[in-house]
Amino acid sequence: MSAKRPADDAVLVDRFWHNYLSVLEKAHVPRAARPWYRKHIEAYINANSGLRLSIHQPARIDDYLNAKGRLAGLPEWRFRQIADALRLLFYELVRPEWAMTYDWYQWRAFARQLEPDHPTLMRDANPSLLVAPSSNPLTIRFRETCADCHAAFVRTIRVRGMAVRTEQTYEHWICRFLQFHRWKPVDALDTADVAAYLEHLAVARKVSPATQKIALNALVFLFREVLGRAVDDAIPYTRTSKSRRIPTVLSREEIKSLLAAMQGRPQLMASLMSAPR
């Protein structure tokens, strides 16, 4: 049997990257972020050269992400992007049996906070025990139908020590965002969907600029910090206009009545202030 030619290897490599980029497109990874996803996978493959992806095991992912998580100069959102790139590679493309049950979300939420000698810290944490019960049907649906996303959201909030009120507010807006988009899977939503919802708040709901900004903050947190998407606050959307406050002024008759009820110096000062100029 003849040895495999370098040209054959090049074809296989090109096919692999074509398939991976197709996975990124189906997962709605922003086009600008896709080259970064490819770089993350190239770095992972180079770190495990000579070992076929199909025989990789969870321990190898654990070791790699633990090492990345201890890099002091690596931004947190970039780390979660690395974890997401690996998730899409193994869960959607390579598809070994273990990838279907591997806890990918725990890396998005926790790995930056893991100690070197605790590679599985809080892996078995149950966020449902850490949140207050709710009778709100939107909150209940978010927690039940998007359990993995909700777990990652709670973990990310708690790792950062953010205020309980912030957690409740962000959860509120995430629920309303998902309801607006008819509870589509979170992985099927992107920044265009965020812009559409923010415009809905401005046009249909006529919320204040401050309220719209809070909703934006909640959704940027969801996509960037929880899901590891490369988004920022500069999402193009229709801003709510500030309402004009028309000053309240007295009528001429009201001014005359007011001056008539005054006397002495106060009356003189008020008369000068109200005199036409």
Image (cartoon, rainbow, N blue to C red):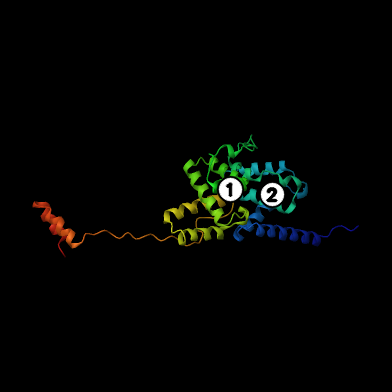
The x, y position of residue 208, in whole percent, is 41, 56
Task: Determine which residue is flagged by label 2.
Answer: 44
Instruction: Please tell me which residue lies in front, 58 or 46.
Output: 58
Q: Residue at x 83, y 60 (%)?
A: 5
Q: Is residue 1 left or right of residue 26?
A: right
Residue 268 lies in quadrant: bottom left
Q: Residue at x 51, y 51 (%)?
A: 173
The x, y position of residue 221, in whole percent, is 53, 50
The x, y position of residue 59, in whole percent, is 71, 41
Mark nearer the viewer, 2 or 1: 1
Task: Determine which residue is flagged by label 1.
Answer: 141
Q: In this view, does 165 lie to the left or right of 186?
A: left
Q: Is residue 57 left or right of residue 269?
A: right
Q: How many marks?
A: 2
**Amino acid of disc 1:** Arg
Q: Residue at x 49, y 60 (%)?
A: 200
Q: Tell me the SS state at disc 1.
A: helix
Q: Tell me the SS state at disc 2.
A: helix
Residue 247 lies in quadrant: bottom left
Q: How crowded is mark 1: few (under 14 residues within 10 Å), some or many (20 or more)?
A: some
Q: Which residue is drawn at 58% across and 37% down?
A: 129
**Amino acid of disc 2:** Tyr
On screen, 239 above or below 109? Answer: below
Instruction: Please tell me which residue lies in front, 118 or 172.
Output: 172
Quadrant location of the N terminus? Answer: bottom right
On screen, 212 above or below 114? Answer: below
Instruction: Please tell me which residue lies in front, 222 or 41.
Output: 222
